[in-house]
Amino acid sequence: MFYSTELITPLGTVTLASDGDALCGLWFHGQKYFAASISGAMHQKDGLEIFRETKNWLERYFTGKRPEIRELPLRPIGSEFRQNVWKILCEIPYGEVTTYGEIAQRIADEWGLESMSAQAVGGAVGHNPISIIIPCHRVVGSDGNLTGYAGGIEKKRKLLEHEGAVL
């Protein structure tokens, strides 16, 4: 069973999802793949501890603090490949960016492959179910252009500007 609540952020309303213990989703309203990783209905339950913790994390983030990803119990739902990509996203430092190609090369190296498709990485990044906290907004195209953010390029730009990323 999954639970949900809503929160208004400086970038718009988001829906949080949990299995009762860990955060499983954070989506902007109207974003691509909204709640795609959640099977079945979500039941509104505003008072969960994980929701209080996540709201506190987001408040600190949007007021210029740098809360650590590891402060929250996260349980994104996805394939082994996607999980691997999302783990790498969590290692991108605040205010920095990397490319889809760099992530693809890292996965290829870790899995003992000659190469990995940057497009496949892009698909996994785009399906990240925990926006902002798992920082998929920190991934840019090989030429440094802002591409492929399920919440919209303008939100991606604002998140990167908020973090002081040099583009």
Image (cartoon, rainbow, N blue to C red):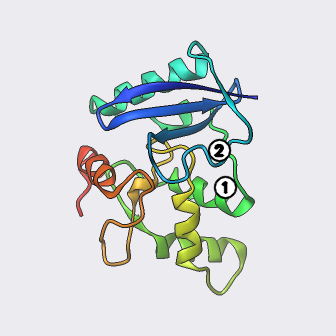
Q: Residue at x 43, y 25 (%)?
A: 7
18 vs 91, nearest the viewer: 18
Q: Position of residue 42 (x, y in %)?
A: 66, 30
Task: Give the vertical position of 113 relative to 9 (above or below).
Answer: below
- Residue 65 is at least partly visible in this image: no
| Residue 128 relative to residue 160: left or right | right
Kindly identify which residue carries mark 1: 83
Task: Name the amino acid type tagged 1.
Answer: Gln
Q: Residues within 10 Å of mark 1 (few under 14, many from 20)?
A: some
Residue positioned 52% across, 18% down in the render = 52
Residue marked by disc 2:
76
Q: Position of residue 2 (x, y in %)?
A: 70, 30
Q: What kind of residue is marked 2?
A: Pro
Q: Quadrant of residue 63?
A: top left
| Quadrant where the C terminus is found in the figure | bottom left
- Earlier sequence position, callout 1 versus callout 2: 2
> CB atoms at circles 1 and 2 under 8 Å apart?
yes
Instruction: Kindly give the residue lying farthest to the top in the view shown.
Output: 47
State the image coordinates of residue 35 (x, y, percent, origin top left).
60, 43
> Farthest bottom residue?
114
Residue 65 percent across, percent down from the top left: 32, 31
Q: Secondary structure at mark 2?
A: loop
Q: Nearer the viewer, residue 72 or 109?
A: 72
Q: Is residue 119 visible?
A: yes
Alpha-carbon span between mark 1 and mark 2: 8 Å
Task: Give the label on residue 27, or none.
Answer: none
Residue lying at 30% horizontally and 71% vertically, measured from the top left = 145
Total labels drawn: 2
Secondary structure under badge 1? helix
Above or below, comparing residue 24 to residue 154 in the picture: above
